[in-house]
Amino acid sequence: MHKLLVTGASGFLGWHLCRLANLDWEVYGTYLTHAVEIPNIKMQKVNLTNFQELKQIFNEVQPAAVIHTAAQSQPNYCQNHPEESYATNVIVSQNIADLCADASIPCVFTSTDLVFDGLNPPYRETDPVCPVNRYGEQKVMAEVGMLERYPMTAVCRMPLMFGAATPTATSFIQPFIKTLQEGKELKLFLDEFRTPVSATTAAKGLLLALEKVQGIIHLGGQERISRYDFGRLLVEIFQLPTTGLKACRQQDVKMAAPRPSDVSLDSSKAFALGYQPLSLRAELEKLV
């Protein structure tokens, strides 16, 4: 089996990716602060912002391919800690592209739908980027830097992701469910639209991109949905109390990082390659 290096293996997407990739690859995963054991995955603690440590893991593992999921992905955190998040989101990504280029191995990068301003959805790969917050800006810089250094990189723009909690990470649905189960109020945006997918589907998309994609690809879901309507679907499928679910608008909630209103992705390019997200209802029913 060929060796696959997955950065950010303790993260929500990274964990699901390692579990899936393990079927066809000898998987090596990196983590920084959250040590996690995944059956049959060789985990190593690596500070990716230390170039010597990053280079050493490449030299030791000699991977046949790399999927780079590690990131500082909280927009509010990036807004408030620009230098630290720049080092993680931009410099590390560019260094990984350099190392993959040196070894001439496939490189997959997880970018975001937040590279867009939300004014002209749905977005195709060829649409101009225009991020409204620092996290989106950093992902754009990483995309550009990686493709300049290594044009063979597959830049995968990821949507909002949900799924089963991992030993060290949750998706946005776990706190939603907990809040409603406790009878508390859960306010969700009526005016923020995304094209969500489950982490398992996203992981399948990344492995498909590893085989078939160079350049930019969108790995969004089939359906455009507001946060509030997603919440309603969650309530129905998980049979949660409905009383706490309330609609609000983005302007009602003060956040450090501005949020675009509709970054729905047009993923028809990926669908044509065999990427097959299920309906949101089917994805959620699998989680019950």
Image (cartoon, rainbow, N blue to C red):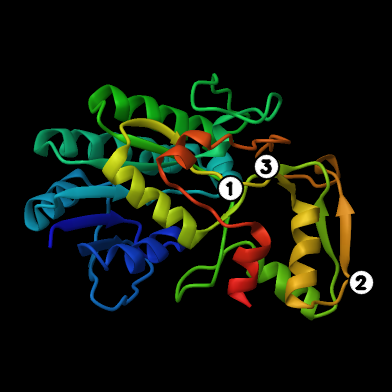
Q: Position of residue 184 (x, y in %)?
A: 84, 73
Return the residue at label 2.
243
Q: Position of residue 167 (x, y in %)?
A: 45, 76
| Nearest-to-viewer mark from 2 and 3 | 2
Near-viewer residue (79 or 247): 247
Marked residue nearer the N-terminal end (3 or 1): 1
Lateral position of residue 268 relative to residue 88, left or right: right
Q: Amino acid at mark 3?
A: Ala
Mark 3 element type: loop
Residue at figure coordinates x 59%, y 36% from the top left: 265
Return the residue at label 3.
256
**The quarter of the displayed image where residue 283 is located:** bottom right
Image quadrant where one finds the C terminus: bottom right
Above or below residue 76? Residue 171 is below
Instruction: Estimate the spatial distance between the alpha carbons at disc 2 and disc 3, rounded to whole Å.
Output: 29 Å
Marked residue nearer the N-terminal end (1 or 2): 1
Q: Residues within 10 Å of mark 1 (few under 14, many from 20)?
A: many
Mark 1 element type: loop
Residue contact at pointers 2 and 3, CB within 8 angstroms:
no
Above or below residue 234? Residue 134 is above
**Marker disc for residue 221:** 1
Lateral position of residue 228 relative to residue 135, left or right: right
Q: Residues within 10 Å of mark 3 (few under 14, many from 20)?
A: few
Image quadrant where one finds the N terminus: bottom left
Q: Amino acid at mark 2?
A: Thr
Near-viewer residue (149 or 26): 26
